[in-house]
Image (cartoon, rainbow, N blue to C red):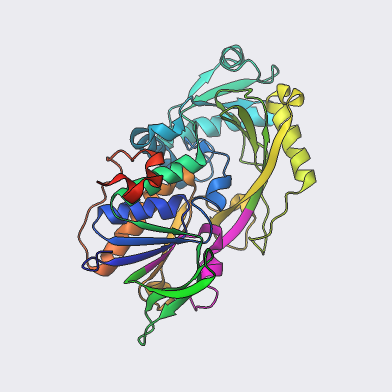
Amino acid sequence: MDYSKAQIIIIGAGFTGCALAYDLALRGMAVTVYERGEIASGTSGRTHGLLHSGGRYCVNDRESARECIQENRILRRINPQCIEFNGGLFVALDESDLAYAPEFEQGAQQCGIDIEKITPQKALQLEPNLNPKLLAAYTVPDGAFDPLRLALAFAASARYHGTEFRPYHEAKAIRFDGQGRACGIEVWDRTTDQTYIAGGDLIVNATGAWAGMVLKDTRAKVAVTPTPGVMVAYDRRLINRAINRLNVPGDGDILIPQRRMSVIGTTSYEVDDVDYIPVDDDQVRQMYEDAVALVPAVAQAKMRGAYMSARPLVGKGESGRSLARTFKCFDHARSDGIECLVTITGGKATTCRVMAEKTADLVCEKLGITAECATSIQPLRPYRDYYLPNGGRS
């Protein structure tokens, strides 16, 4: 560890924590990432893997839609190794879907999302397993990504630039100095059952749906609602493009190709205990019915598995579907009077790079460091490099 550099502690090694470690390391800081499990062992490893075009949000959440299409293009450029860019379709199956089409067209145009209306016959030529009764279809620049590989590509790039990752090291409490500034964390090494104190100049809480739990023994607050959703994977690759229902975002309206599988998602509900979220059988059945409505051939496939992930939606007091899908960076000096403590949460996998950029900008501002973000132009390291000594550095 180079102690001549600013020492940054990141709690959480999901998409955002890994992307932030890479960004801060490129800006010349000494970064250590603490994660209670393995890389992407929380929500990041349980996403359905949709590279969003923004089409899903272009009517009701245009800020998120613009973020998505911008980051979609950047991720395809810097990390093609992890992305299958086959495009996507929004399809109408009933009159309600058709009524939504004009708003969808207008929203996509205003958000800069390239779409094309095609005939149902053309859609069936592109995806023969689609419901033959579809009434309309639009192409969108969606894609699919491998969740673990995406996180590892950012982590590998961070390690190459000197970041230290400590998996199975759980942050149990935030420590403060005599002036009330965050100055370190109490860490439980789960591999040895030993506890120790790690010091740093600034701490970033990048734990997503667990952000409130990390801060529970402090006076810091974050407006985050853990909102799980159930996804179901089937053992046949029945589509090559992401298939979206042409309507207001709802349950079971995205079917995604993942390697040799098809994955349908997702439901949306709220929980209090984000560490214990059972997969509800009724929701699994609902996902099956929704998948069959989009692609009837799912009825001939076998379920490979059902799983859930807890989204960290920004906001409280509303239903999960109405909460913003964009992200928020909390400077706890401004909101709670606690210096040297920052939380980044919200967003989605597609926007993890820009979430990291905005958080790194704040870290630089707080530490008086002048350094520009370079993550939008530099290609990421191969994800396998994460497992090389020193991340592949000679």
Q: How many marks?
A: 0
Residue at coordinates 43% horizontally, 48% vertically from top-left?
A: 352
Residue at coordinates 76% horizontally, 23% vertically from top-left?
A: 300
Q: Is 221 one of the magenta-colored residues?
A: yes
Whether residue 94 can be seen here: no
Image location (x, y in percent) of residue 371: 21, 56
- State the residue in front, 126 or 157: 157
Quadrant that contains the N terminus = bottom left
Residue 125 lies, with reference to residue 276, above or below; the image says above
Image location (x, y in percent) of residue 227: 62, 55
- State the residue in front, 347 or 377: 377
Q: Which residues are magenta?
A: 203-227
Residue 122 lies, with reference to residue 57, above or below; the image says above
- State the residue in front, 311 or 63: 311
Whether residue 79 can be seen here: yes
Residue 190 lies, with reference to residue 154, above or below; the image says below
Q: Is 266 one of the magenta-colored residues?
A: no
Residue at coordinates 74% horizontally, 29% vertically from top-left?
A: 302
Image location (x, y in percent) of residue 218: 50, 78
Q: Is residue 236 left or right of residue 362?
A: right
